[in-house]
Image: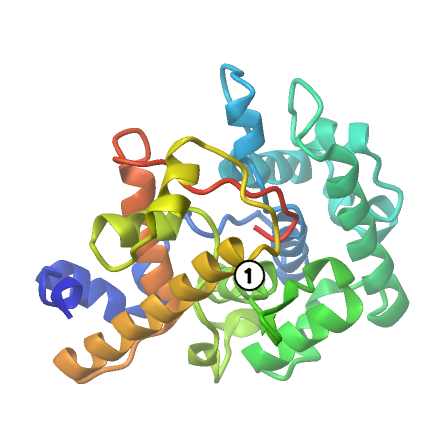
Amino acid sequence: ARFVDALGDDDVARLKRGCRGFDDGAHHGDVRGDDEAMAMFTLCVDAINFCFWPDHDDGVEEGLEYEHLTRGWRNAHAGDWTVLTCERLQTMSGPDLRAILNWPRPLPDEETRARLIREVGDGLAKSFGGSCAEFVRAANGSAVRLVELLLKHFPGFRDEVHANGDDVFFYKRAQIFVGDLWGGFRGQGLGSFHDIEALTMFADYRVPVTLREQGILHYDDALLTKIVNKEEIPANSAEEVEIRACTVMAVEAIRESFAKKHGERVSSIVIDWYLWERGEGKRKTSVEPHHRTRTTFY
């Protein structure tokens, strides 16, 4: 509640505008072309939108970032529209992907990223005539259904874990794909979803840091020591699952507090975007680093 109470009028208005309040390109890139190109671009970016931090920890001058993915695919498509066709995606190699992104050295997890791009091409070719726009239309305007279709046809998006006797489903990259369509199309056309508020935030690295700085998320001493010392926390470990789950629950609590105070429910997606922006803005001055987990899911 304190976090919501501290929001300024401009921030409140921005959150209420939904995807139209976050249309500056920081969260969802775009390409010149038709709906097909935009949808395919978004799917390709989010298929490989994970685990950038190892490149930074290796001490290179410039580490891989999300914007390198969006800029790389955008510029490659501007020079050769066929890079966003199933035929090209189905034969993608690590060096091919590196060239598309115009990256000067092997990408982190390069072959895994190339395999996930091939999976996109294969899935679309097999079930949707090679069309990403048709894939999106198959969801009939349902964000939830589109997530389900992603999980069915593209196994690389199945961000699931069995922990403490329970099945836990985060689906970060699947949900962010839908959110990026919603934002990239400004909530219109292929980006129009009648149930967008059913999605959660995107559980990853940056938002937990922001929640920590706001006094919303707390770690025990043992976990905090690991994070501050930049020790790797294994994927699917109890600590990693709890960080992600608590992040989701914290954003839902913010959402409920916002609705109670302002009489209007907003999407967890825009709260995520808002918190992510705050975290990115303080990346170099944050009191503590983000947790480090090697995973293909975020």
Q: For the point 46% across and 77% down, which residue is it?
A: 196
Q: Does any portion of residue 173 appear in the rendered image?
A: yes
Q: Estimate how packed mark 1 is, as few (under 14), some (14 to 19) or many (20 or more) residues with alpha carbons within 10 Å.
A: many
**Front-lying residue, 229 or 208:** 229
Q: Secondary structure at mark 1?
A: helix
Q: Does any portion of residue 24 appear in the rendered image?
A: no
User: Vertically, is 59 above or below 235?
Assistant: above
Name the spot of residue 175 as percent of width and height, x first: 55, 66
Q: For the point 63% across and 59% down, which residue is it?
A: 39
47 left or right, relative to 292: right
Q: For the point 26% across and 70% down, which residue is it?
A: 254
258 left or right, relative to 135: left
Kind of residue indicated by mark 1: Lys
Looking at the image, what colour scheme do you see?
rainbow
293 left or right, relative to 276: right
The answer to which image quadrant residue 81 occupies is top right
